[in-house]
Amino acid sequence: MISKPTAMLLTGNHAVSYGAMLARPKVIPIYPITPQTPIAEKLTELQLSGALEAETMTPESEHSAMAACITASLAGVRVFTATASQGLMLMHEMLHYASGARAPIVMANVNRTIGSPWGFWPDQTDSLAQRDTGWIHYYTESAQESLDTVLQAYRTAEQVSLPAMVIHEAFYVSHSLEVVEVPSHAMVDSYLPPFTPEIMLDPSINRSWGNVVNQEMFWRHRKYLGEAMEQTLEVAAKADAQWKELTGRGYELVEAYRCADAEVIIVTMGSMAGTTREAVDMMRARGLAAGLLKVRLFRPFPVQKLQSLLKGVPRVMIMDRNFSPGLGGVLHQEVKAALYGMKKAPPLYGYLVGVGGLNVSPALIEKLVRRTLREKAEINSIWVGE
Amino acid sequence: MENKANAARYYDIHEEKVFNSGHQACPGCGQALAFRYVLNTMGPETIAVVPPSCAAIISGPQPYSSMRIPVYQTTLEASAASAAGIKRALIARGKEHVHAIAIAGDGGTYDIGFQALSSAAERGEDIIYFCMDNEGYMNTGTQKSSSTPRYAYTTSTPGGKPTKKKNLAEIMAAHQIPYVATATVGFPDDLVRKVKKAKEIKGTRVIIILTPCLDGWGLADNASVKISRLAVFTGIFPLYEVENGVKYTLTHGSDGTPISAYLKPQRRYRHLTAEQIDTIQQEVDEQYDILLRRVKCFA
Ligand SMILES: Cc1ncc(C[n+]2csc(CCOP(=O)(O)OP(=O)(O)O)c2C)c(N)n1
Ligand code: SF4
Ligand SMILES: [Mg+2]
């Protein structure tokens, strides 16, 4: 029991575990994979110590873990799980099942390269490949943000009946130690009411889910799912504002940092946002007018917000730590689509940086900003290696 | 052991109305009978998981359901994990008395769902798993599964399946779970008794039910009960139970009827040569002998 907000030295992964513990999930089916394992280990440790009262379940695969998450959620309890990379890939089919069943599961994903070849490096392709699964996707940059976002994710997911993924990168966030303020149980209880769905799998309610439907029913079901996604923009913004009121920490869905009068705005996600913030400060100190736009909520994609923040900006560069072969950087493509047809749309420069976990330093970011100011925009994303 | 004359008496058991008429099985389908015996014995305090299979079709299209209990349709691989998730939630909610069951086909059990089932058994999940074994992927148009017996025609083994049927009952028994049983629709009393027994036990329980498929096996509309009884009397599908992986009990077995009596009425075996029939007979005799020795060993 955490009786008052407590500063602890935690890795990003352990911060996630504390966030999950504070949400009081009742069932936790989980399967280990590097670099997610510390999340699972901390949870089982907390459970053994009595700090967490939950059924932990150790199935043979992530596919089964997610299968159990879905039914436990539909049977009326809050659930949590975590995975990474290959595990997320194996879950793919079940991710669709989860959103289709409107199960408000919260899952942490630690971004790691997908084989082959085998690797363990931070790369966002694993979660970005799940963008059409009907999950809410949050990308976080620090241990504190990951903890806070797990709780915001529950608050949001349960209001819109959609599953939510909280995503941070391997090692840069997952294994880096930071001082994290862990909120008290009482604070979290006031923020996150018990999960008590009206409809659930229970003989006394006697409702079923998943039987075959006709085309019209399927169409309607997808449309409702889309409406819930749209609603999520507002619900998630409110959940963030309420969290800020309670703890003093808010992150917004899209954060604009020193974007006023910027000659170049850098759009990115995850740990690169933290590095970019440093780089922006350094560049501004040298008179280079750069700003950061951090996309924290990737699904639903905050199109209007991006439009209003990027309208009329002289140049926008997008940094992608992921790669969609045959197309380029995923965020680059999404931003392009979001701004298409907009009046005073900025020229976009897409950079494939940090793919495969390459380090993206403030110096590299400055170099790219200078290049962006110098060169003409190109349609395709450009490969960058240090 | 029951003799033939005795077994012919009509079926008379107490039923709770959980399974309804108006379901979508082919008229005469053996599996519909299994649904009735299983569900009406399980009773209303039950939640079922069903993967894609004929069982999913029998469950009925939204917004209808042939079952008066909550049913969740999962993916083909995940039945055991999905049922376990339900049970864990029920435990967390203090509703442990409600049963979580899975009703899956042989493809969803012997093949693609096996990994999840094996793990659930190893973890001792408190579920009852019913495998509706029609010895092939019927929902997708009769392809082979690892439950398809040797030489049987399927659309993916048009020359007859060259390999043996996987012995799932033995594999599950080797998990040393509290209860594994085989059953079939031609022996409703036996099936119902096994479901009742499973209900009283805690932990992972698996009942494999031979459910003849009219279309997939090439049977007359009224033949499913008869053929399921022949499967037992010829010894190709003996009815037994295994408790904790060691205590074997034969409930109905071979009366010496030659295997040809079972093979002949089925279109899937129409192409068999006399030699192939002999091979099947030999394999059946061998397997049956092994089973009898196991039973004796633990008597
Ligand atoms: C991952 C996946 N692969 C393939 C399918 C297609 N599929 C649906 S039902 C089925 C066959 C199931 O066979 P079985 O479990 O024996 O059930 P039956 O149809 O015979 O009742 C298959 C292959 C699927 N639904 N999911
Ligand atoms: S295809 Fe076979 S198993 Fe499926 S409903 Fe028809 S008879 Fe029954
Ligand atoms: Mg089958």
Image (spheres, rainbow, N blue to C red):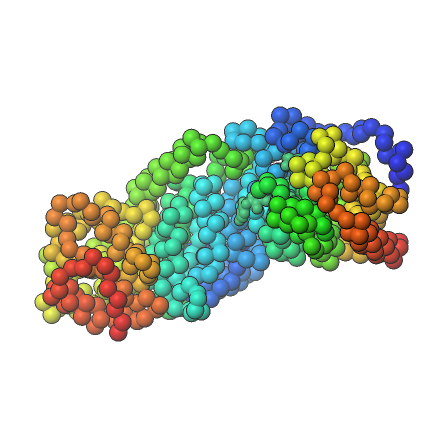
Give percent across and percent down for residue A60: 58, 58
Hey, which quadrant is residue B270 in on the image?
Answer: top right
Q: Residue at x 9, y 67 (%)?
A: A287
Q: Is residue B166 left or right of residue B287?
A: left
Q: Quadrant of residue B239?
A: top right
**Quadrant into which the C terminus of chain A falls:** bottom left
Count of marks placed on residues: 0
Q: Residue A31 appears at what percent x and percent y? A: 52, 59
Q: Residue B179, position in %: x, y?
A: 74, 49
Q: Is residue A242 left or right of residue A364?
A: right
Q: Nearer the viewer, residue A184 or A227?
A: A227
Q: Which residue appears at 77% of the width and 43% of the height?
A: B263
| Location of residue A337 with respect to A49 vertically, above or below | above
Which residue is the extreme one toward the bottom?
Answer: A386
Which corner quadrant of the figure contains ligand 1? top right
Residue B152 is at least partly visible in this image: yes
Left or right, B143 with respect to B290, comes to: left
Up the image or down, A150 lies above or below B4; here it is: below
Q: Residue at x 57, y 49 (%)?
A: B78
Q: Nearer the viewer, residue B298 or A90?
A: A90
The image position of residue A158, as x and y in percent, is 42, 42
Position of residue A334 in the picture relative to residue A80 (left or right): left
Q: Quadrant of residue A61?
A: bottom right
Question: Is residue B80 visible to us here?
Answer: no
Front in this rendered view, residue B153 or A295: B153
Give the answer, above or below, for where A273 lies relative to B214: below
| Residue depicted at x 14% and y 53% | A346
